[in-house]
Amino acid sequence: MQITSLVTGGAGFIGSHVVNHLIEMGHRVIVLDDLSGGVIENIHSDAEFCKGSITDVFLVNGLFEAYQFDYVYHLAAYAAEGLSHFIRGFNYQNNLIGSINLINAAVNFNVKRFVFTSSIAVYGTNELPLIETQIPNPEDPYGIAKYAVEMDLRNAHEMFGLNYTIFRPHNVYGPNQNINDKYRNVVGIFMNQISKNVPLTVFGDGEQSRAFSYIDDVAPYIAESVHLKVAENEVFNIGGGIPFTVNTLASEVMKAMEAEVKLTYLEERNEVVHAYASHEKFKSIFKPVSETSLENGLAKMAFWVKSKLKNPQPVKSSKMKGNGAQFPDIEIEKNLPNSWKNNR
């Protein structure tokens, strides 16, 4: 009997890649996405698409009843860590309450495994490298929501027997990423700015460091995790292992795009300064063959970006305004970075 899987956020960046791998693995895939950040063009032609939100309880329960999913891959989220301070209600409604709707349905309809993409944002400022045994200390509402979902999944397992696998990816980039969102995805922001021949905008002095993760080092393992018993009810850091400063990233992105622009340094914002993780637990279970270097990963993404610029698709408007416009529903203006106030 064919395996049936739900992928939330399957029209988005990481989600669309997970869908592709699941189709290759022989799963019947149903994509639930409200197209607030993703686009239909990202969805594999063999997947079944339902436009809607995880915050719609009636819709969610109806899908679970109709399809009797074996597995749920929950990737739908608005992952703007810095902006989450200023859209707290929106953040918790979409990233936490929406997730709980899915968990409730997964329990009620006897889903075999719930795969959740969390984030290393749950760690906050912690001893480096970040490791799964550390006590999370999230410093922004986005990380708080992610960690709350993790805790709820553990509770649902203990109370109802819902099995889960949690991944904590970080700074993922690659083809299908929305390069027009001004609030998140620094690689995409830089490539978009270079394509427009405008200066790269850097918060603070640019010496913050992150490890950047190419999509092919993340998505396949998320997809295959349900077939690994040893990954059941476990948490894994996943992604790139070598940290780079934002200044270094800017230089590498310019090389990949074969263009040079100036850097504009903006006021420092409230964020974790250094964040990179240990992936030893992930490697011991999934046994990846290799890791894509930053140079090679950026070259692949730059090739994709340039091909898209030659053949642009029409931009669809959305409530999320992920296509470069200002986020329309800022809840707190106090301490909002000046660069995000422009044109409001």
Image (tube, rainbow, N blue to C red):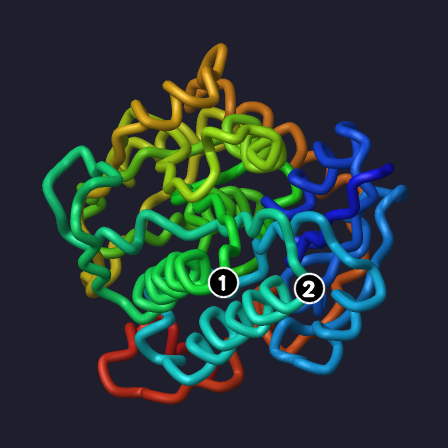
The amino acid type of the residue labelled 1 equals Phe
Q: What amino acid is at disc 2?
A: Phe
* Residue at figure coordinates x 78%, y 40% from the top left: 3
Q: Residues within 10 Å of mark 1 (few under 14, many from 20)?
A: few
Relative to residue 236, is residue 189 depicted above or below?
Answer: below
- The quadrant of the image that shows the N terminus is top right
Count every numbered label the image shows and give the total: 2
Question: Quick check: can you spot residue 193?
Answer: no
Residue 107 shows up from this direction: yes
Q: Is residue 48 left or right of residue 233?
A: right
Q: Position of residue 239 (x, y in %)?
A: 41, 32
Residue in the picture at 89% in, 42% down: 46
Relative depth, front residue between 262 and 145: 145
Residue depicted at 32% across the width and 87% down the height:
333
256 shown above or below 62: above
257 or 150, which lies in front? 150
- Outermost residue, left side: 127
Q: Name the residue tied to disc 2.
A: 109
> Which numbered circle lies on residue 160?
1
Q: Secondary structure at mark 2?
A: loop
Q: Position of residue 316 (x, y in %)?
A: 76, 67
